[in-house]
Image: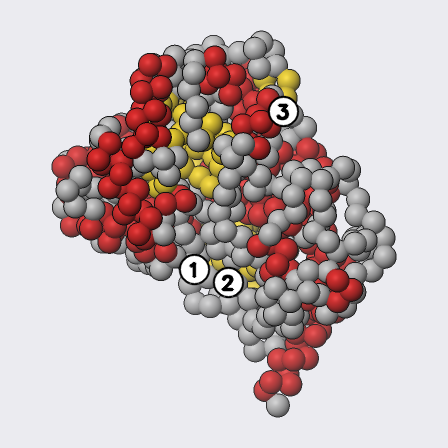
Amino acid sequence: MFSTGRIHAAGLSLASLLSAGLAQANPPSAVPLDTLVKVKTDWAPQGNEGTEVDVSAAGNEVAAFQVAILGGTGGVPGVSASLQDLHDGAGHGLPAGSITLFREDVLNVTQPSDGGGGTGNYPDALVPAQDEVAGEARSAFPFDVAAGQTRAIWVDVRVPAHAGPDVFRGTLALSGGIQAQIPVVLTVYPFDLPATSSLRSAFLAFTPSICALELGSADACASPAGQALLSRYVQLALDHRVSLTNVEPVAASASDLSGYDTALAPFLEGSAPTRLAGAKLTSLQYPLGANAAQYQAFLSDAQAHGWADRTFVYAADEPGFGASTWDQARQVVSAVQSAAPGLPTLVTTTVQAAQQNGVAPNILVPAVNEMDDVSGTYAGDQRPAYDSFVQSGGQLWMYQSCMSHGCAFGGDPTQSGWPSYMIDASPVRNRAMQWADFREQVSGELYYETVNAYQGDPWTDQYRFGGNGDGTLFYPGGPSRIGGSTEVPLASLRLKQIRAGMEDYEYLTLVSALGDPGFAMTQAQTVVPSVHAVNPDPNALRAARAALAQRILALVAPLSTGGAPSSGTATGGAAAPGPSQGGSAGPTGATARGSGGSSTALPPGEPALDGAPSLDAVVSNPPKPGQSAGCGTAPGTSGVAAAFFGLLALARSRRRASRS
């Protein structure tokens, strides 16, 4: 929420304005924004923006926002920004390194993505003041804003676990050619999101392209510098709740998996130096050849390390359309299931096509367009067709492809409503995929590539397969471009939106696990009425996220304070299947607290008052389809603010008592 108004600059002297004949001209200004606005260089305020930042987050969540800098008539030279530590007024602040500021670099899009794209200077690459992986100072600031143009700063505030309930305040300071002080208020909820995503993901990266572009040779991936660089990509992705599932910092060998294991173990076991402490990869792609002995060896190795439930063999990609044939799909699936039956096989296809062609993988991954198309073979919601597959133990994932924007120039304009990772798609569409994943009750998401444009120069051109940014979510962060001394990956603005979508998915999952899956499904359907028709209104997504947070507070408050649930029935429609239906959706780990940093008085697994299960028990054992979490009549959302501030008062009183 942002209070209305604009902040005008005080940094240009009157003399300089007069000398330029600009005394009565439009002065530079700064406008705080949330993340559901794309600040192109021609962006102008709509009149409903604010003068302060007011954001909310759970523990293990990132509260992000933007500040648009309008150049006015004369432009703004040398813009810099800083946000000092946020404090709660009671002696508590966020840990060092929790705040990262970025300059939003722009890409000149000259050819729109098919089916609803645009042209112009779109923000996408995020150049950090201090990078997210190596922690080195980089060249985000200062930067200039040309006259009549707008540029933006992106801010990440990473909230650690056990930080709420609390309210932190600080000031974002702009300096250089513009002087402004923007108040920042961060409300931290009394619950945490799990560090490891509840939605499995398998995002791919063609590593030779990374090493060729950043280190000068594809062969450099095998060098210590290449191994370190690839590890940084895995780490940055994991900090955005995404698993790079085919990246091997040390290449797997059929004769010896020890180096491969050692390099990936920290990411699989939650001990890597991620900013999202404890985050684990949710998927691991089989890296060896089509050989029975190698299938067996890989599975045995994964079982010995406790990773087997996250492995899969990518048996065929779009058989009949892509590089794979149906004969190849049948052969690989059969070979794996015969040699190593505990090693899941994955095929990107529909259940109808798989059945027609006699292929029975463990994981089916239809495209979003095949789950609920506008017309044709897959017109209408196809999710019921997968019920039998899921109920028999199959895992249902989903992916988006170039079909969401037409695949070639002159694409079908009806392709403008799908979730989309394109640069010139709206922030809502960039963030909607995980809402669609929840709506369709899938347990994983696949994306075919994240460095596709590295075969050229991603800083200047990302038009591939009819879309701007198709298959590219990172930028190469070489010292020659961003300063510092270490090659690092940089996140795109779209990767930030994917992270936000993954966090949205956790809110939906938590509401379901706490006993109100119908309410969660209603909110998901508000944002994604159908998979081919994402609600374009950002206010719908804002309202849905706010409603989910309020519902969690209402459901968590009795467990956190040890009280009984209040009267009133849950709202939001009929119960829906839990998101973990149809295979492991990854571990959940949401917890509630009655004081900052301390756990609820209810030990894990101990029943709450009035027969309601503890929160830990609920999230560890989500309700089955059509079943509540056992809390009886769930509290309504009335009094949510009072419940939150009651928890906040309790937390602060306990802190004062602990210091006395």
CA neighbours of label 3 inside 10 A, class few (<14), some (14 to 19), many (20+): few
Q: Check disc 3 and report its element: helix, strand or loop.
A: helix
Alpha carbon distance from label 1 to label 3:
37 Å
> Which of the two labelled residues, at mark 1 and mark 2, occupies the earlier sequence position?
2
Residue with the mark numbered 2:
160
Left or right of 506 on screen, residue 311: left
Left or right of 510 on screen, residue 412: left
Q: Position of residue 502 (x, y in %)?
A: 52, 44
**Quick one: 139 or 533, which is closer to the camera?**
533
- Between disc 1 and disc 3, the foreground one is 3
Q: Of the residues shown, which amino acid type is indicated by label 2?
A: Pro
Q: Picture quarter containing residue 532?
A: top right
Q: Which mark is residue 384?
A: 3
**Quick one: 280 or 307, which is closer to the camera?**
307
* Whether label 1 touches label 2, CB < 8 Å: yes
- Between disc 3 and disc 2, the foreground one is 3
Residue with the mark numbered 1:
277
**Quick one: 313 or 451, which is closer to the camera?**
313
Left or right of 263 on screen, residue 145: right
Q: Picture quarter containing residue 185?
A: bottom right
Spot the residue most to the right: 567
